[in-house]
Image (tube, rainbow, N blue to C red):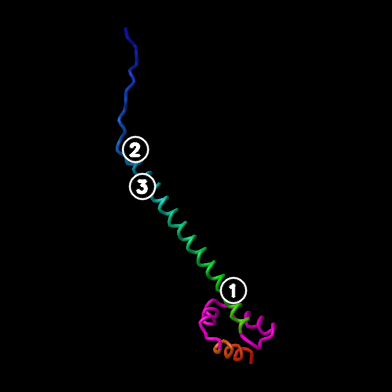
Amino acid sequence: MNLEVHSVTRKRNRVEKEGNLDSSRNNNFQMDSLNKLTETISSFADKVDRFMARDQGCWKLIKEIPDLTDSTRFKVLELLNTRAKKIDFMEMSSEERSKWIAFQLT
């Protein structure tokens, strides 16, 4: 009498096969999301760097205005407390900047 047990190879069912497809789709989605996040962070870092450079530009412009004491320069820098104000200040002509400072300090 032969009591050997034959090993039976079982086919994978559809759910198992689709599970593998879903996991590869999920991995692709995660990689795409990670790439987008990396690009967004990089873009944000570039914008912060440009903004910081712009802040230094305001100080340079303030120092170029004649007849301002150091305390007046510091007050002007303090008045430029928003990004919009800094952008507007940088777009003004030298004469407009002087008038703006006089207006703000009176």
Proximity of marks 3 and 1: CB atoms separated by less than 8 Å: no
- Residue 1, numbered circle: none
Residue 27 percent location from the top left of the image? 40, 46
Relative horizontal placement of residue 105, taking residue 39 as reference (left or right): right
Q: Quadrant of the image for the C terminus?
A: bottom right
Which residue is more in the foreground, 104 or 23?
104
Comparing labels 3 and 2, the label whose residue is closer to the camera? 3
Mark 3 residue type:
Arg
Q: Quadrant of residue 83?
A: bottom right
* Closer mark to the observer between disc 2 and disc 1: 1
Q: Earlier in the sequence, mark 2 or mark 1?
A: 2
Range covered by the magenta-colored residues: 65-94
| Number of disc labels | 3
| Mark 1, residue position | 56
Q: Is residue 11 above or below residue 58?
A: above
The circle on residue 25 is 3
The residue lying at 38 percent from left, 48 percent from top is 28
Report the quarter where the N terminus lies: top left
SS type, badge 3: helix
Q: Disc 2 marks which residue? A: 16
| Residues packed near mark 2 inside 10 Å, few (<14), some (14 to 19) or many (20 plus) | few
- The residues bearing labels 3 and 2 have C-alpha atoms spaced at a distance of 14 Å
